[in-house]
Image (cartoon, rainbow, N blue to C red):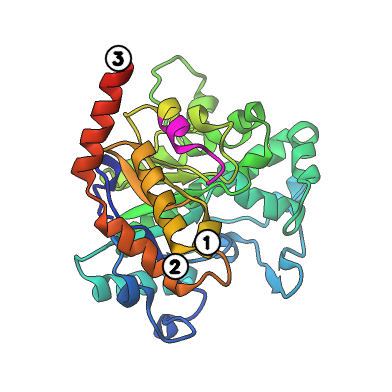
């Protein structure tokens, strides 16, 4: 994938490398680098979405069973005082990792950045870690909306600066993960997640206070400093949110594997690019079945504006042979033929 991926088709998924370790130890556990193994169009350093939290005043621990744990969840105005502007010096290892990867791949692949959306980050900060119910933060929408909005606004500014930092360190494109946005009913996502992601194009008469609030939107902030950087938005369980996601101002919408690709393309239209959405479980299937599914997804996505990828992350234990096969099939696809088939089928529908 290249920096122009938002306007063209591309035949290969992104690879991941982890930046939880110092830059000097970036190789994966087996010593075999994904970039060297698969040569994808895009390479992503998988930095956990919680990585920047300590840099703006939210320390956390990782426990073996519970995962991320925040000892002092933020649920009151008093807790807001612990927050401070993001200190990018504390994230220097992310920048160094991106620069190292940039040198490794040169101009042969795009480097992808990686951040969590404000709502998703807020779920961890308010709940104190992972949760299955999201009852505390959902309740705050009604019991302490001013506190939650203040937190989301702070996160928006911090995440926007973090995106710009990654772009300045070598990222060609940045994916925003609203992983838990799908846990909200669509009308609540419209109120509590979308406004902190989107770029507003409207020229209406707002109060000064609201204007100050609107200027904090992530896409808007990033567009000012990195106008040519494509932004991708992914939400896990986004079938009920596609049309709303389109209104955020991002360049690419990532579809998870539960969305029918043909239906997703129809609902979003041809004016925005899409990414996805092969079910990761297919990589455990016989290779011919994986081949058929890749070809089906590509055909349903149409001839332009599609980034072929999985509809979620690679699952633990996925056979490396299947990953290699995914790339081989992707490279073998003749997009011109797909375009011709797509137009032929459209003409049949018109007739």
Q: Are the residues flagged by discs 2 and 1 in contact, CB closer than 8 Å?
A: yes
User: Residue, x 58% and y 69% (percent of image)?
Assistant: 316
Q: Which residue is mark 1?
A: 285
Image: 44 above or below 11: below
Q: Which residue is mark 2?
A: 322
Of labels 2 and 3, earlier in sequence is 2
- Residue at (39% x, 83% y) in the render: 32
Q: Secondary structure at mark 1?
A: loop
Q: Residues within 10 Å of mark 3 (few under 14, many from 20)?
A: few
Check the picture and name the quadrant holding the C terminus: top left
Residue 260, image x and y in percent?
50, 37
In this rendering, the label closer to the viewer, 2 or 1 = 1
Where residue 190 appears, x then y in whole percent?
A: 59, 29
Percent from the top left, x then y, of residue 309? 41, 53
**Quarter of the image that includes the N terminus:** bottom left
Where 325 falls versus 31 (above or below)? above
- Total numbered badges shown on the rendered structure: 3
Q: Is residue 171 visible?
A: no
Regarding mark 2 in the picture, which secondary structure is present there? helix
Categorize mark 1 by other alpha carbons within 10 Å: few (<14), some (14-19), many (20+).
few
Q: Is residue 199 left or right of residue 118?
A: left
Q: Is residue 263 magenta?
A: yes
Q: Nearer the viewer, residue 350 or 131?
A: 350
Among the 4 quarters of the image, the one containing residue 104: bottom left
Q: Is residue 204 visible in this depiction of the protein?
A: yes
Distance from disc 2 to disc 1, alpha carbons, whole Å, reads 8 Å
What residue range appears in magenta?
257-265
**With 339 as the anchor, is 132 left or right in this view?**
right
The residue shown at (76%, 67%) is: 66
Task: Determine whether the residue tagged by mark 3 lies in a helix, strand or loop.
Answer: helix
94 left or right of 236 in image:
left
Residue under label 3, please give it: 350
């Amino acid at each position: 994938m290249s920096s122009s991926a938002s306007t063209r088709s591309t035949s290969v998924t992104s690879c991941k490398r982890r930046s939880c370790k110092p830059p000097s130890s970036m190789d994966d556990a087996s010593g075999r680098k994904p970039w060297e193994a698969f040569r994808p169009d895009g390479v992503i350093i998988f930095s956990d979405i919680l990585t920047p939290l300590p840099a703006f005043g939210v320390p956390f621990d990782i426990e073996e069973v519970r995962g991320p744990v925040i000892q002092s969840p933020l649920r009151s105005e008093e807790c807001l005082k612990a927050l401070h502007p993001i200190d990018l010096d504390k994230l220097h290892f992310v920048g160094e990792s991106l620069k190292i990867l940039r040198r490794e791949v040169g101009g042969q692949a795009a480097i992808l950045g990686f951040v969590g959306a404000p709502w998703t980050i807020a779920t961890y900060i308010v709940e104190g870690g992972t949760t299955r119910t999201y009852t505390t933060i959902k309740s705050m929408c009604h019991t302490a909306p001013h506190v939650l909005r203040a937190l989301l606004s702070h996160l928006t500014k911090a995440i926007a600066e973090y995106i710009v930092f990654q772009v300045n360190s070598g990222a060609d494109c940045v994916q925003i993960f609203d992983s838990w946005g799908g846990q909200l009913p669509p009308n609540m996502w419209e109120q509590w997640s979308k406004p902190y992601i989107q770029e507003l194009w409207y020229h209406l008469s707002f109060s000064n206070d609201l204007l100050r609030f609107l200027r904090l939107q992530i896409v808007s902030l990033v567009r000012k400093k990195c106008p040519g950087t494509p932004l991708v938005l992914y939400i896990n369980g986004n079938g009920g949110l596609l049309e709303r996601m389109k209104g955020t101002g991002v360049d690419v919408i990532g579809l998870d594997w539960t969305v029918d690709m043909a239906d997703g393309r129809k609902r979003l239209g041809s004016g925005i690019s899409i990414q996805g959405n092969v079910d990761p479980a297919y990589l455990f299937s016989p290779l011919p079945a994986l081949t058929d599914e890749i070809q089906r997804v590509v055909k349903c996505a149409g001839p332009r504006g599609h980034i072929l990828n999985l509809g979620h992350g690679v699952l633990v234990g996925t056979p490396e042979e299947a990953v290699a096969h995914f790339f081989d099939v992707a490279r073998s696809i003749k997009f011109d033929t797909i375009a011709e088939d797509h137009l032929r089928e459209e003409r049949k529908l018109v007739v």
